[in-house]
Image (cartoon, rainbow, N blue to C red):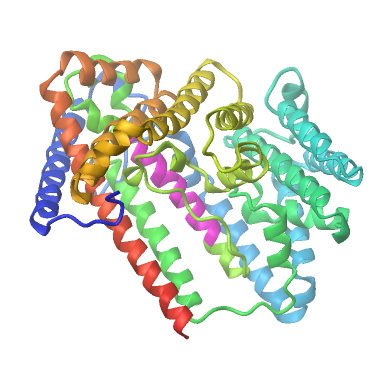
Amino acid sequence: MGIRTTLPTAELGLYSLVLSGALAYAGRGLLEASQDGAHRKAFRESVRPGWEYIGRKMDVADFEWVMWFTSFRNVIVFALSGHVLFAKLCTMVAPQLRSWMYAVYGALAVLGTMGPWYLLLLFGHCVSLYVASLLGQPWLCLGLGLVSLASFKLDPLISWQSGFVTGTFDLQEVLFHGGSGFTVLRCTSFALESCAHPDRRYSLADLLKYNFYLPFFFFGPIMTFDRFHAQMSQVEPVRQEGELWRIRAQAGLSVVTIIAVDIFFHFFYILTIPSDLKFANRLPDSALAYSNLVYDWVKAAVLFGVVNTVARLDHLDPPQPPKCITALYVFAETHFDRGINDWLCKYVYDHIGGEHSEVIPELGATVATFAITTLWLGPCDIVYLWSFLNCFGLNFELWVQKLAEWGPLAQIEASLSEQMSRRVRALFGAMNFWAIIMYNLVSLNSLEFTELVARRLLLTGFPQTTLAVLFVTYCGVQLVKERERTMALEEDQKQDKEKLE
C-alpha cells in the first residue's frame, strides 16, 4: 500500500524545506570545522597546499583520488585517448575485427604498465578456467574461479604472484589487485556461460577478447560474458538517435564532477576529520558520516562514468554507476559497484535464493554471496564485520516484510489510508537508511569513528539528536519515494504508448 500514492504538495514542500535547511546547517558546521582544523598537527599529513588561486589547503587523505588526477592523470588520459582513437580507426577500416583490435591494444597496455610476466600470469589463469569450461561442470568452474580469486587475496600465493609485476610505482598494488581480481571474475563468467550454453562453442580467443578490453580491465565495471559477447559481436553496430549527445553529456558531467570534488576538498576536510576523534567529537558527526559515504559514491560514479563513456563510444551498454547513497533506504539496492552486484546476483544470489521470498533459501543465498564478497574484498576483521552486518540487514528486511504480511499487522495496515501507509513505511525506511550508513561506515572509514557516531545518535544524543536526525532522514526518504513514484508512472505511460503504437 502507498507505493504509488502521492502526498499533499504542502507536505512535500515542508519535507524539502526541512531537508534543505538540515543540509545547509550541517554543511556550515563542516566548513567551520575544516577552517578551524586546517592547522592542527593531526591534519598535517593529509591536509596539504592545494590550488594556489583558491588560497586554501586540500584534503588529500584519499591517495587513490590524488594519484588518479595528479601523477597518473596523464597516463590515464593517454591510454584511454589512444583506445578511443585506435577504436575509431578500426571501426572505419575493419569493423569485423574490432574486438580483436581492442584486445591487442589492451594487452599491449597491460604489458607496458605491468610487464610481460604479469601478462603471462593472467594468461595462465585464463587458460585454466577455459580448460575447466570445456568439462561443462558449473560447480567446477565456480570452484576453480574462487580458488584463483583466493590466490590473489591470501598469502603466500599473493606475495608470490605480486612478484610477477615489473618495476615499482605508486599505483602498482591497486592496479595489480584490480587487474587480477577482475580477470578472475571475467574468466569465471566466461566458464559459467560456456556451461550454460554448450551449443555456442566459445573459444579461448573469445575469452581473451573479453578479458583484455582495456577500459574495463583494471577497475571494471564488469560485464557478464554473455552481454559483452553479444554486443561486441555486432559487425555493424548502429547508434540510437541522440546517443552521441548523451555520451558527450556524460563526459562533460564527469569532468564537471571531478573539478567540483577537487574544489570541495579545499573547503571540506571530510576524510581527514574522522581520523582525529577528539576533534570529530565536537562536530555534527552524523553529517560527517553521511558525507563520507556520499563521497565514496561520487568517487565510484566518476570512475565508472569515465570508463562507461569510452565503452559507449565502442557501442557497448556497460553497467550503470551505483545508485546514490542518498536514494537508498533498503539493503537490497545497496551496492557501490553495479557490475559486481550483477555478477553476484546472476551466478550466486539469484541462483540460490530464487524469488527471494522464503526465509531459509534467502539466508543461504545471502551467506554465500557475502562469503564471496568477503573473498573479493580481501579477508580481514573489518571485512568480516562489514559482511556480517550487511548480510544481517538484507535478511532482516525479509523478516520484517514477512512480519508485516502476518495477519494482525496486515489488517492494521489495511485499515490505514494509502497516504498513512506510505508515511509509516517511510519511517521504517528512515531507520533502515541509518542502518545502511552505519554498517557501511565500518569499512569505508573506521570502526572507532563508527562507534563515535553510533554513541552520539543512540546514547549521548538521545532523544534530541536521535529524533532530529530521524525526522530529517524521514523527509529525505519521502522525497525519494516521490521521485520513484513519478518515475514509475512515467514508465507505465511509456509502456502504454508503446502498446498503442
* Nearer-the-camera pick, 100 or 399: 399
- Taking 258 as reference, is 200 left or right? right
Residue 9, image quadrant? bottom left
- Asked whether residue 442 is drawn in magenta, I would say no
* Nearer-the-camera pick, 450 or 61: 450
Majority secondary structure of magenta residues: helix
Residue 401 appears in the figure = yes
Q: Position of residue 164 (x, y in %)?
A: 78, 32
Q: Residue at x 66, y 77 (%)?
A: 237
Q: Report the label total.
A: 0
Residue 122, image quadrant? top right
Q: Residue at x 28, y 19 (%)?
A: 454
Q: Which residue is drawn at 50% across and 27% down?
A: 391
* Nearer-the-camera pick, 81 or 190: 190
Q: Residue at x 83, y 48 (%)?
A: 195
- Asked whether residue 296 is drawn in magenta, I would say yes
- Taking 23 as reference, is 118 left or right? right
- Taking 95 as reference, is 124 left or right? right
Range of residues picked out in magenta: 292-308
Identify whether 477 is placed above or below 388.
Answer: below
Q: Position of residue 34 (x, y in %)?
A: 21, 32
